Image: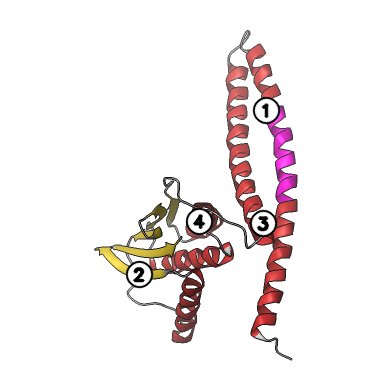
Amino acid sequence: MLLQPDQERMVNRRHLIVIGQVIVDYTDKIREQMAVVGELTDRLKGVVHNVKTGAGNDADQLAGIVSTIEKNVGTLVGKSRHLHRFGHRLNDPGSPYNPVDVIEEVVTFLIRAARLHRVTLSCEKPETVPDLTGDPVFLHLLVVLLINGLLEQVGTGGKIAVRAGKTEQGILVEILAEGSFAPEDPHPEEDQQQYRSLVRRLVDELGGSLLDEAAAEGKKRTSLALPL
């Protein structure tokens, strides 16, 4: 027996809540472990300081180790923060959220996919933008779809940059792609129609508008306008 649309949506929402809880629990554990690693790093710094009163070679090696640990800890803490924040929003979909947080998380999650396509994906740090009220999952999924769509089009060595800013009407999210674009979409027409239909539905859910345009030769711009 097929679920009614409202029932299906409720089941999907419950699945997302479970995912959010798992992410929160998992990232809490990561943060605890990173705190331990950070404490050990501080101890290594003390060792380096003591060793520097003697020979220099060992001290330089230890300093390099400490620097590498600090860099990796910083990266993991950043990823943990994104996952933790994402999980909390899934558990409370009606609370205000900042669209920049959502965009940064999406870019973080898609960095690996971009590397597999040999495309540089980045997020430009904007000025402060106001919070939105609603379900952030719609924006999250929409930005994922738009970036993935561009990753399929941009050739090796291409670049995709995402940025957001405040306008008089609300918030503008821009995805700028640069590279050698594929002349035709390689996916079947049915898949393309489903993709476009889902994108339109998500834009409607957000109450926004979407515009695709060629910014210049070898460049494309996708602009998503969102009301406050």
Q: Which residue is disc 4 drawn over? A: 99
Q: Which residue is disc 2 drawn over? A: 211
User: Where is residue 145 shown, x and y percent of the image?
Assistant: 49, 68
Mark whose residue sits in front, 1 or 2:
2
What predominant SS class does the magenta segment belong to?
helix
Report, in whole angstroms, how far the alpha carbon at label 4 lies from the one at label 3.
Answer: 15 Å
User: Where is residue 227 shown, x and y percent of the image?
Assistant: 44, 63
- The answer to whether residue 67 is above or below residue 6 is above
| Residue 47 left/right relative to 198 | right
Q: Amino acid at mark 4?
A: Pro
Residue 154 found in image quarter: bottom left
| Residue 228 left/right relative to 81 | left
Q: Which residue is disc 3 drawn over? A: 87
Report, in whole angstroms, how far the alpha carbon at label 4 lies from the one at label 2.
Answer: 18 Å
Q: Which residue is disc 1 drawn over? A: 41
For the residues labelled 4 and 2, say whether their Cβ atoms are less than 8 Å apart.
Answer: no
The quarter of the image holding the N terminus is bottom right
Q: Amino acid at mark 3?
A: Gly
Q: Amino acid at mark 2?
A: Leu
Nearer-the-camera pick, 141 or 111: 141
User: Dot 4, how many residues are within 10 Å of its Cα: few (below 14), some (14-19), or many (20+)?
Assistant: many
First of labels 3, 2 by sequence position: 3
Residue extending furthest toward the top: 53
SS at circle 2? strand
Residue extending furthest toward the bottom: 1
Q: Is residue 36 magenta?
A: yes
